[in-house]
Structures are given as structure tokens and as C-alpha cells.
Amino acid sequence: MREQLLAAEKVKAIDWRDGALHLLDQRVLPFEETWHRYDSAAGVAEAIRQMVVRGAPAIGIAAAYGVVLGARARLAAGGDWRAALEADFRVLAESRPTAVNLFWALDRMRERLERLADEEEVLAALEAEAVGIHDSDREANLTMAQLGVELIRRHDAKAQKLLTHCNTGALATGGFGTALGVIRAAHVAGLVERVFADETRPWLQGARLTAWELVNEGIPASLNADAAAAHLMKTEGISWVIVGADRITANGDVANKIGTYQLAVNAMHHGVRFMVVAPSSTIDMSLASGDDIPIEERDGRELLEVGGKRVAAEVDAVNPVFDVTPADLIDAIVTEKGVVERPDAEKMAQLMCRKRLH
Ligand code: MRU
């Protein structure tokens, strides 16, 4: 199956070439395919903040390349370049708060930097580390896709209806996708009758990005309002809700795009299985539970306006853009280290002791 999955890897949103980071602008998809070139850490941080690049793994990969760009400029400026580079780490870390992959990638870059004594080696070593982060995310996607398909097949080997939320595909990751990677692989394996994609208000990642990826690959799909999900679970015979994650804590709680929690509650009520697909770089064992996860709150205008035009009455808006699904609503967390069914603190700790499966 690996070869078939690699053949399906068509979309690329992060490209490191000619000593610069090139990002496909996700704000204007699906209408325009516009690439921007970044050659500074501050530029990459701004791209993350402005949502040019998004999705937890993609943000982490972009930040790693941002460190390479920062180091290049600081070394060229001379003086105490290591101290100056701290400002780049800081600006990158402050770009978005919830997806832990950002902090995980910055920590990995810092650890690599701290092991480097010879100034001559710094740039090549940091670049290799960033490329390694990118490549290993791509590999993790392939492993998770295969594990997710095995899980689906173990419960039912016929083509079935799946529901997903937000974007977790090639645009949001280094390669094939997390939840959407499992869905892609399930399609290759003949296990998909139809995918229901939540539109994912207010940024419409489902309508703009997931729908675009699904249609490009000829996967039978339809778009639905977020509020239609419970009705579809009741009437359509959906067997799995499959989502990604932005941060998973030591007890198996999962932060993901706002609306995920209500999907999990509804899935439990309707007997629909609930799968979370995320690389181990999304697991934050330093936090005991989801209550400790910083939840990004964005400008209320994202709700009050559509396409820059006000659609709401004169009222304040509350706009948390992630929520936390408690572990006891989750059937399985699929990672590149393996699958945790009915997650809890003990099983998460065991998972993190394992090696990657590829
Ligand atoms: O705000 P965004 O667009 O960065 O949010 C993206 C999501 O929440 C994804 O569902 C999540 O990162 C899963 S990872 C592929």
C-alpha cells in the first residue's frame, strides 16, 4: 500500500529550495494557487500568524525552516549571533499558541544548535535538522495512514461513510495528511463510500481546503454545515468521525479545531466511532490534561463578518478557535508509534516509550 499512497501524494504546500522557504498561501485557496517566498525568521513567523501556513505539523515544519533563516542572518551579522538568534526563537514561538508541534520543532532546533560547537557547521546542521523534521512528518503520515486503515478494516471491511472536520491533509502537514491521510488510504483500500466534510466555521478549512483536496483526488465527498453533523450521524449511517489534533496531553485529551468536542459528544450518543490521527510531535507529555492547554482566541470579526462584510447585529463575538475533547470520548489515537485505543494516562506513557514504527 505504501507505493499507492506515495503515488497519491500530489499536493505540496511547503517547499524549501534555493535557500528560502516557499509557502502555498492557504488563505486564497481554492480560487488561487499563490506561493510566497520567505527569507527571514520574522517573515515565517508572520506567515504562521496570518494563517498563510496552518495545521499543526505544517506550522512546526515552517518554524524549523524559520530558525535556519534566522541563523543565517544572525551569523552573517557577526557578534554574539547565538544571543541574537534567541529573538528569532521568541518571535516564532509567539506566532500561535495551541499547536504544540510549533514548540516541539523549536525545541528540536535548539537542541541541535546547542550540540554544535563549530560555527562552520551551524547552517548545514540546522538545515539538515529542519529537512529531517519535514521528512519524518511525511513518513509519519504514511505509517499513520496504514494503521488507521487497519483499524477501520478491523471493525468493518466494507465501504463506509466517514465524517471529518477542519483540514488535516497535505496542506496541513509535511506530506500526505493525518486524518485526511487515513481517509485517502481508506479510499485506496476501497473502504470509502462517502466523506462528509464539515465546513469548519469561521475560517472554512473544510469548505476551502479539505473539499479541494478530496475533490482533486476523486474521493466521493460532500460538504455540510458544522451544525448538520449530528443529523448526519443519525440519518446517514456514518461509521467513523476521523479528525486531527493540535495538542494531545498526557492523559489522552485532545485539542483540535473548534467544533471537534461537540462531534465527539454526538459520536458517542450515536454509536459512531471517534478516531484522532496525529504524529507523536503533537503529544505534549508535560501537560497532565486538556485543561492546561492554551486555547487560541481570535478576533471576533472572524464571526461578525463574511468576506469583509458585516453580517451580524451590533453584538460582541466570542471566538475560541480550538476546543478540548476529553479522552473518554475517544475510541483511538493513531500515531506513527502505534495506536492507543480508549486512551488514558498509562497507555499514553507506554506509547511514548515506543520507537516509531517506520
Ligand atoms: O487554525 P488552523 O487552520 O491552523 O487549524 C488547523 C487544525 O485545527 C487542524 O485540524 C489540526 O491542525 C489538525 S493537524 C493536521
Image (cartoon, rainbow, N blue to C red):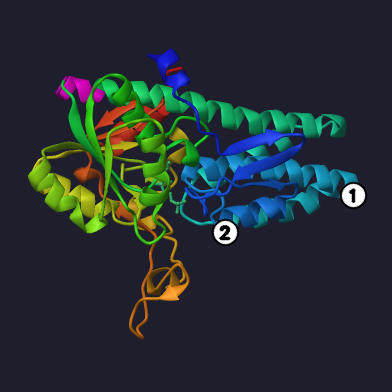
Mark 1 Cβ and ligand 1 under 8 Å apart? no
Q: Residues within 10 Å of mark 1 (few under 14, many from 20)?
A: few
The answer to whether residue 126 is above or below residue 67 is above
Span highlighted in magenta in the image: 151-157
Q: Is 153 within the magenta?
A: yes
Residue 94, image quadrant:
bottom right
Residue 215, image quadrant:
top left
In three-dimensional space, the C-alpha distance between marks 2 and 1, rounded to whole angstroms, equals: 28 Å
The answer to whether residue 322 is above or below residue 283 is below
Horizontally, is 239 left or right of 52 in the view? left
Please, what is the three-letter code of the amino acid marked with disc 1?
Ala
**Which residue is pictured at 41% across the width and 38% down the height?**
213
Marks 2,1: beta carbons within 8 A? no
Residue 321, image quadrant:
bottom left
**Which residue is pictured at 72% across the width and 37% down the height?**
113
Q: Secondary structure at mark 1?
A: helix
Q: Secondary structure at mark 2?
A: loop
Quickly name the residue at label 1.
77
Q: Earlier in the sequence, mark 2 or mark 1?
A: 2
**Which residue is pictured at 19% across the width and 54% down the height?**
228
Quickly name the residue at label 2.
50
Q: Nearer the viewer, residue 74 or 45?
A: 45
